[in-house]
Every structure is written in C-alpha cells, then in structure tokens.
Image (cartoon, grey):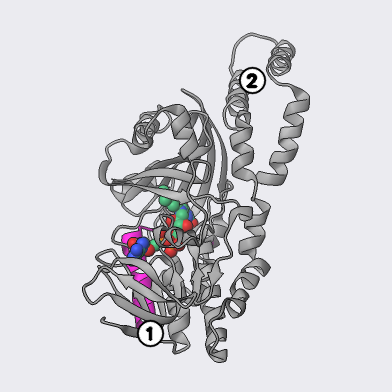
Amino acid sequence: MSDERFEVVIVGAGPAGIAAALTLAREGVEVLVLERGDFPGAKNLFGGILYTSVVNELLPEFWDRAPIERHIINRRWVLLDEDTQVALDLKSARFDVPPYNNTFTALRSKWDRWFAEQAEEAGAMIISETNVEELIIEGGRVQGVRTGRDEGDVKADCVILAEGANALIAERAGFRPQMSPRNRVSAVKEVIALPPEIIEDRFHLEGRQGAAIEYFGGAVKGTVGSAFIYTNYDSLSVGVGCMIEEFLRLKMAPYDLLDWFKAHPMVAPLLRGGETVEYATKMIPEDSYSALSDLYEDGLILVGDCAGLVNPSIHHEGTNLAMASGVAAAEAIIEARARNDYSKATLARYRLALEESWVMKDLKRYRDSVHFMLDNRELVSDYPDLAIRLIRRYFTVDDMPKDELLNGLWATIKNEVSFLKAARQMWRARKTML
Ligand SMILES: Cc1cc2nc3c(=O)[nH]c(=O)nc-3n(C[C@H](O)[C@H](O)[C@H](O)COP(=O)(O)OP(=O)(O)OC[C@H]3O[C@@H](n4cnc5c(N)ncnc54)[C@H](O)[C@@H]3O)c2cc1C
C-alpha cells in the first residue's frame, strides 16, 4: 500500500461505509475500504434491529440470501416499576410478508461481513486489519489517509469517513463536535443463547418471526434511556443504553444497570435458561441536528454515526440513516468525479441531498428530544411511575365501589401532578418526541 492512489478511500466497513462502497463500485469508481477489525463486523455492536428500506433498494429482496436473524412482526413498548409492567403491543400479519416492514434482527458479525461481500462483488476493494490513524491534509484539502501499516499512506481524490460513533479521526481534525455527557449514550449488550423453539414458545412466534421489546421508566431507573430484548434466531440481544449524564447522576455503571434489568421479575422469565455468549459496550452519538458539522470539506465527506446521523427518538434508528448517508455521499462523489472537482463547493450536494430526504427531516423533527427529556425528567420517571400505579389500582379487584375507586385515582392525580406544568410538557413532548 505504499503511496497507493485510489479515487475514493473509505474509512470503516460498517453499514455507512459499505453502502457508499457498493454504490461507488457499481459506477466503476476505484474504491478502497479500510477496516480495522479482523473482518467487517468483527467487533461491531448494535442493539439488533436492522432497518432495511435502503438495503432493499441496493439489493432487492436481500432477505432470501442475507444472514438475517428474524423479521419483526411484534413490537412492544413497556413501562416497568419494581414489580409491574404496562405495555403497548403491536403485532401485525402485515409485517409477516415481504418486505417485512423493513425491520429485521441481525448480528453484525454476520450481516456486515455479508454486506461487505456484496460491495466486493461489485468491484470495491476491502482491506481489513488496517487501522487508519489520521487524514492526510495538504494544501488545505484532504488528500488521503495515514494507516498503521509500515507502508502506510493511501492517497485519494476523496475520502469518506465512516468510522462510527467513536469518531477519533474526524474529531482530531476538528470536523465534528466534541463528545459530551449530554450528547452520547453509553450502551451495553449481551447476546444470550437459547434454542429457537424456546424463543418461539416464549415470545409467541412461528418460524422466522421475531419480536422487539423496548423498556422505559423504572426499567432504567427513571433515566433518559431504555432497555431492550430483541429475538435473534437462536439467541436474544439484551441491553441497556442511557445518556452518559444519567449514568453519572445514578452513580451506576452500565453493566450493573443491565444486571439489575435482567433480574427484574418481568424480565428474568424471558431470559431463563439462556447462556451469555457475547458481551460488549459501545457509545451512540445523539448530537442534535443543530450541532451537526458541515459533514463535508475539500476532499472529504462524513457519513453515518461519524457524522452524528442517529435518530434519538423512540424510533432508535441508526443503521438506515447510516446507509442512506453512505448512498448520498457516493452519489455526490460520482457527480464530483464527472466534473473532476472534489472541492467543498461541489461536495455540498451531499448535504443538500440529505436535507431534502427523510434523514435530515427526521433529525430536524427530533432535534430537541434528548435535551427536552434531560430537562423534564418527570416524563421518564414520575409520570410513568404514576401511570403504572393508576392502571394497576384501577384493575385491582377488591370490594371498593368503582365510583369510590375513580375518585381516589383522581385525588392521587391532583395530589401528584401540576396540571399546567404537565399539560405544557405533554404539548412539547408531542412536538419533540413523537
Ligand atoms: C448498543 C447499540 C444499540 C443500537 N441499536 C440499534 C438498532 O437496534 N437499530 C439501529 O438502526 N441502530 C442501532 N444502533 C446504532 C447503529 O449501530 C449505528 O447507527 C450504525 O451502526 C452506524 O453505522 P456506521 O457505519 O456509521 O458505523 P459503525 O457501524 O460503527 O461502523 C464503523 C466501522 O468503522 C471501523 N473503524 C472505526 N475506526 C476505524 C479506523 N480508525 N480505521 C479503520 N476502521 C475503523 C469500525 O471497526 C467499524 O467497522 C445501536 C448502537 C448501539 C451502540
């Protein structure tokens, strides 16, 4: 690789980098992907839901041949307190037929590897076990990357940074905002092996159907965060993720919170008999739309988590934004190539395309959601707790006349909730979080 030159070098073989590589290779662009893992996906971690509208455009009906785990037909959002759960449960036969609501569970070590093979078949070159250390910036523009290998430099007309959430290269070069406890989630996840028949029985599934359950409120001790259980084919992905500021406030480590969640009486029976076969921790960027950098420079484009493109709302989407940004970056570079001009002015097309797409429209819509929740913690602690107590009491069977029961519930609400404050919070929550 000594002083090799490619038209495009991509740092990172995650969903963003590979979507870009595949799109570029199909147009005959000479593209090199550098990945530090032993193979694409070797060390990659996510919760487990792959959103696939972009994949289905790139690789139509990929589910027939890709290593996906299950298609999600059942989504459940659950509030917990110490011994009770209240849930909203969505299960649909419509999600049981192609394209399966574009929602699948996957394990990154299998999925990323397969996705990367599709890019290789299209003509991209992927070199693993190669850590990129920094950008080569000369004459005021990015000219390539410096790797950890002896013969280390690779020159390029354009570099795509797809290095994920821990974006050291972009941060060092000053091309993205610094990390803070208010814009990063710390997450920890276990993969727990269980026989497929037990998973299907326990979660009321058949064949390759899957379930995704997300927990809030007391499940994460009333913090801004959530816990999850997703069904793979013969394992469960189980994890928690909260804003770093929340872990500091709780004075609790992420893995202690996960152990606590796993032992909850509403959760433990779902995991019973399983064996933990994987354990990992990672960050999720939750930069607000307003804090995003330009996302492009002379000879450089940032994509995916590295660019801060994660939807922090209840939708918890990242993989689809990563892939959509990878495709948009590739399309901008294809246009720049036709003009032989990789300047910032030409690459601005990338940001424009994202702004016009659902990617930035969604990020704009949820731009205040994280800070709003951090500043209105009643929404994740007091109100869910009250809702559970009210619903539990309402359905508790005893000899109290129902009129008296309802009067008691109203009295509890009046006693514990400031109506004006709650109404204002709900109004803003509707606008910032739903
Ligand atoms: C716990 C957790 C749960 C999540 N759950 C979900 C979910 O259920 N659904 C969802 O859609 N999203 C989820 N996300 C977010 C999702 O994982 C990301 O949005 C998505 O992976 C971003 O893709 P990417 O390609 O930008 O980055 P990544 O997937 O992080 O890929 C970056 C790649 O770059 C490589 N790399 C990094 N630095 C270098 C370097 N210096 N040199 C060479 N290679 C390098 C890495 O090894 C990696 O392969 C979750 C994230 C976490 C942490």
- Looking at numbered disc 2 in the image, what kind of residue is underneath it? Tyr
User: Residue 49, can we see it?
Assistant: no
The part of the image, by quadrant, that contains residue 293 is bottom right
* Region in magenta: 102-123
Task: Classify 10 Å Cα crowding around label 1: few (below 14), some (14-19), many (20 and above).
Answer: some
- The structure residue drawn at horizontal position 37% and vertical position 33%, both measured from the top left corner, is 253
> Answer yes or no: do the residues labelled 1 and 2 have beta carbons within 8 Å?
no
- The structure residue drawn at horizontal position 68% and vertical position 15%, both measured from the top left corner, is 412
- Looking at numbered disc 1 in the image, what kind of residue is underneath it? Phe
The part of the image, by quadrant, that contains residue 135 is bottom left
Q: In the rendered structure, find residue 394 and report the number of the disc placed on it.
A: 2
Helix, strand or loop for disc 2: helix
Helix, strand or loop for disc 1: strand
User: Residue 177, can we see it?
Assistant: yes
User: Label 1, label 2: how many angstroms apart (C-alpha)?
Assistant: 67 Å
- The structure residue drawn at horizontal position 35% and vertical position 31%, both measured from the top left corner, is 256
Which residue is identified by label 1?
6
Q: Main SS of the magenta segment? A: helix
Choose between 381 and 160: the one closer to the eye: 160
Q: In the rendered structure, find residue 377 and report the number of the disc placed on it.
A: none
